[in-house]
Amino acid sequence: MSRQSPILYTALLLAGLLAALHFLADAHSLYWRFWWYDVMMHFLAGLALGLFAYWGLFASGILFKRERRTSLVVASVVISVFIIGAAWEVFEYANGITDSHEGYALDTTNDLILDCCAAALAAFIGLRKRHG
């Protein structure tokens, strides 16, 4: 087992947790009942996607081999997650999944910020695991 495999396994575990929480939320209208549920979900999604991005870009050696510059690692992971998060927001809007309300732009901005903050955390977790 590779030293970086726990990063992939953690990302898969978080993705499974995210799916379970989403189905639970969908069945019980949790996104509308609790304001913080969407915040939690975006943070978990950003963390899971960030770990996947870190593993895919750096830990697996598929794209970069043992990059040592922290700024490149963090920026690459955050940008990857931002692109996926922005695509998700467009998907939600295009399919009428979201409420288009007065504060929609602010909500979307908040969602993307949460995604990116969690992605930065994931990059630092990956870097710490590599150097730890």
Image (cartoon, rainbow, N blue to C red):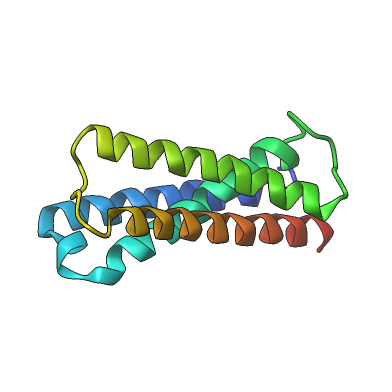
- Circle count: 0
Asked whether, in this view, residue 110 is left or right of residue 102, the answer is right
> Is the C terminus in the top left, top right, bottom left or bottom right quadrant?
bottom right
Percent position of residue 32, x then y: 16, 62
Residue 8 in sight from this viewpoint: no
Asked whether, in this view, residue 9 is left or right of residue 86, the answer is right
Q: Residue furthest left?
A: 28
Depth check, front residue: 80 or 64: 80
Depth check, front residue: 3 or 81: 81
The residue that appears at 27% across and 60% down in the rendered structure is 103
Residue 58 falls in image quadrant: top right
Percent position of residue 104, x then y: 28, 54
Would you place residue 84 above or below residue 19 in this image?
above
Residue 98 in sight from this viewpoint: yes
The residue that appears at 81% across and 54% down in the rendered structure is 70
Percent position of residue 37, x then y: 29, 65
The residue that appears at 67% across and 61% down in the rendered structure is 125
Percent position of residue 42, x then y: 40, 56
Depth check, front residue: 44 or 84: 84
The residue that appears at 26% across and 32% down in the rendered structure is 94
Would you place residue 111 above or below residue 67 in this image?
below
Depth check, front residue: 101 or 16: 101
